[in-house]
């Protein structure tokens, strides 16, 4: 590697030379993020629905999710590591916890802002509470839930770069290796793909969100 | 709407279906594999690579290295859980509250306390030192040292309030040998402190972002950025002798490891370790290359 070349050329060359390794790390990175987000959806949406039941319950659930969110990420991961050990599982649970708040909150807000008349209409045609939830409320709240997922995904892709610190894989490997070796090229080679992943995730989920929104307006009309 | 709901459902099921797949992917076998953990800086990585080369040369075992673990605490917790079985640790680690310790800063005694304490409470075998210690030392930029005539830490007394200090993130909060205890022992407080990742402090001094740093004594950053280390004239910092540490159950299962681990005991002095670190941090060579070259030069590996 020629040290005289401009930084972006060296970063490009490094990325080209190590493309196999980087692609593997991107795979590891995305696997953690997917699992963390999936868990957060599975747990967060029901909790958001639960929040709708009473203001008090909402305060408790959202409060708890808030507390998790303000814990410094490395501290949270180090604590989780005590229970779950090094590596993938700890990271997935950490990402899950960090993704909870935006998903719970947006599910709750999405359900709460619904036109009461729609819900009444649903009841009027004899829908059970479950039917109402699945056929009317959740579909209409979907754009909000997607917006929450979008926020959660961007956060998770960022937090996942901490994985090497607790024995996980992912793009953080290159970043921390570069940080330690005082090698800026390596830091960029890890940070740029992570940033691109975050931007892509935001764009793709944003596009999906737009489609859902159109859909739900059609349903409302 | 029907179609949309279906899509959403399929997406959700897809995500959930991925989960067990990914979870199983990570559970590796532990049979004849030894996993060595290493902290974020180069020194333990180089030493881990040495053992990897030696053990894979002399036994049928596979050695994996988990680098960049956040802190010694994480390394020890992971070792206790068995996710890793071996690491390089420093005798001063005992001040971090793993068990009750006598009030001492004597080099030999601290090592003994570490060996006995981690044996009894954690089931680790803590070997004698490689032959070097990597403790904390204050280092200042050459121009600052010249300007204020600084040789010892006590010399900082009248000037520290005008100086900016770069330190690793853990030091400010440590009890026994942290900033609070330091302020009491020396009666010195710095004007401003900037906690950061340890690898960044040297460059921060080089770039004149800070005037003084709390350095690791074997770190090549001291040499690279032309920093002057100050003598710890009140012997505030405890000894940090570096030793290999391994889980005893691993040693029982593979007694042949004992001889291999012992090969590096007392072999590496601070100057040598500093040079090996320099090759990785400054010359940008990879830790495994540097480790194998050292072993070959010293007749430890063919």
Image (cartoon, coloured by chain):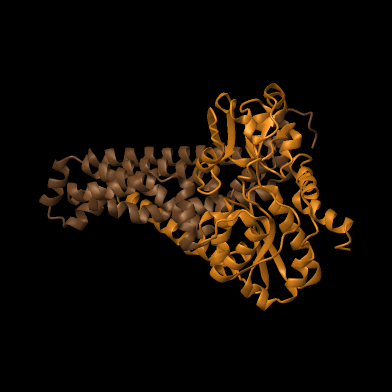
The colour chain A appears in is brown
Question: In the orientation shown, which residue stands out farthest toward the left?
Answer: A124
Pinpoint residue B262: horizontal percent, then vertical percent. Answer: 76, 67
Residue shown at 80% from the left, 52% from the top: B289
Residue shown at 77% from the left, 69% from the top: B260
Q: Quadrant of residue B167?
A: top right
- The total number of labels drawn is 0
**Which residue is more in the foreground, B143 or A57?**
B143
Q: Is residue B257 above or below residue B75?
A: below
Please indicate, yes or no, whether residue A168 appears anywhere in the rendered image. no
Pinpoint residue B138: horizontal percent, then vertical percent. Answer: 65, 37
Residue shown at 44% from the left, 56% from the top: A93
The colour chain B appears in is orange
Question: In the orientation shown, which residue stands out farthest toward the top?
Answer: B147
Q: Is residue B155 above or below residue B215?
A: above
Please indicate, yes or no, whether residue B95 appears anywhere in the rendered image. yes
Image quarter of the C terminus of chain B: bottom right
**Which residue is more in the foreground, A80 or B137?**
B137
Q: Is residue B120 above or below residue B169?
A: below
Q: Quadrant of residue B250?
A: bottom right
Residue shown at 58% from the left, 66% from the top: B118
**Which residue is more in the foreground, B41 or B225?**
B225
Pinpoint residue B271: horizontal percent, then vertical percent. Answer: 80, 47
From the viewer's perspective, tell me whether residue A156 is left or right of residue B297.
left
**Which residue is more in the foreground, A36 or B199?**
B199
């Amino acid at each position: 590697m020629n040290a005289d070349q401009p930084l972006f050329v060296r970063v490009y060359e490094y990325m080209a030379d190590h493309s196999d390794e980087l692609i593997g790390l991107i795979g590891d990175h995305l696997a953690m993020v997917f699992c963390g987000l999936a868990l957060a959806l599975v747990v967060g949406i029901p909790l958001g629905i639960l929040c709708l039941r009473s203001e008090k319950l909402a305060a408790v659930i959202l409060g708890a999710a808030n507390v998790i969110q303000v814990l410094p990420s490395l501290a949270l991961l180090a604590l989780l590591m005590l229970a779950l050990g090094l590596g993938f599982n700890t990271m997935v649970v950490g990402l899950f916890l960090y993704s909870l708040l935006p998903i719970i909150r947006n599910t709750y807000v999405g359900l709460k802002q619904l036109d009461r008349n729609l819900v009444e209409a649903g009841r009027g045609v004899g829908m059970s509470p479950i039917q109402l939830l699945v056929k009317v409320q959740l579909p209409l709240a979907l754009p909000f839930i997607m917006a929450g997922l979008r926020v959660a995904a961007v956060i998770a892709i960022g937090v996942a770069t901490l994985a090497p610190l607790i024995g996980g894989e992912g793009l953080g490997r290159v970043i921390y290796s570069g940080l330690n070796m005082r090698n800026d090229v390596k830091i960029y080679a890890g940070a740029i793909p992570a940033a691109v992943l975050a931007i892509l995730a935001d764009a793709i989920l944003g596009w999906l969100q737009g489609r859902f929104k159109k859909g739900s307006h059609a349903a409302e009309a | 709407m029907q179609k949309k709901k279906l899509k959403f459902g399929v997406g959700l099921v897809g995500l959930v279906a991925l989960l067990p797949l990914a979870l199983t992917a990570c559970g590796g076998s532990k049979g004849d594999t030894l996993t060595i953990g290493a902290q974020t800086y180069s020194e333990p990585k180089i030493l881990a690579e040495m053992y990897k080369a030696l053990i894979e040369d002399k036994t049928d075992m596979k050695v994996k290295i988990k680098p960049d673990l956040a802190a010694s605490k994480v390394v020890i917790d992971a070792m206790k859980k068995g996710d890793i079985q071996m690491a390089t640790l420093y005798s001063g680690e005992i001040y971090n509250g793993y068990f009750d310790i006598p009030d001492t800063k004597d080099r030999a005694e601290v090592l003994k306390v570490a060996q006995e304490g981690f044996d009894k409470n954690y089931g680790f075998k803590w070997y004698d030192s490689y032959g070097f210690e990597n403790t904390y030392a204050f280092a200042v930029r050459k121009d600052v040292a010249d300007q204020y005539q600084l040789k010892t830490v006590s010399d900082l007394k009248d000037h520290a309030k005008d100086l900016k200090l770069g330190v690793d993130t853990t030091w400010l909060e440590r009890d026994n040998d942290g900033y609070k205890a330091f302020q009491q022992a020396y009666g010195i407080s710095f004007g401003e402190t900037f906690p950061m990742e340890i690898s960044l402090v040297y460059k921060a001094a080089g770039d004149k972002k800070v005037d003084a740093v709390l350095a690791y004594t074997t770190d090549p950053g001291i040499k690279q950025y032309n920093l002057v280390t100050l003598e710890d004239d009140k012997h505030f910092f405890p000894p940090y002798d570096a030793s290999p540490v391994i889980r005893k159950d691993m040693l029982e299962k593979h007694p042949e490891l004992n001889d291999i681990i012992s090969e590096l005991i007392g072999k590496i002095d601070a100057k040598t370790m500093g040079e090996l670190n320099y090759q990785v941090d400054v010359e940008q060579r990879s830790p495994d290359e540097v480790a194998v070259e050292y072993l070959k030069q010293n007749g430890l590996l063919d």
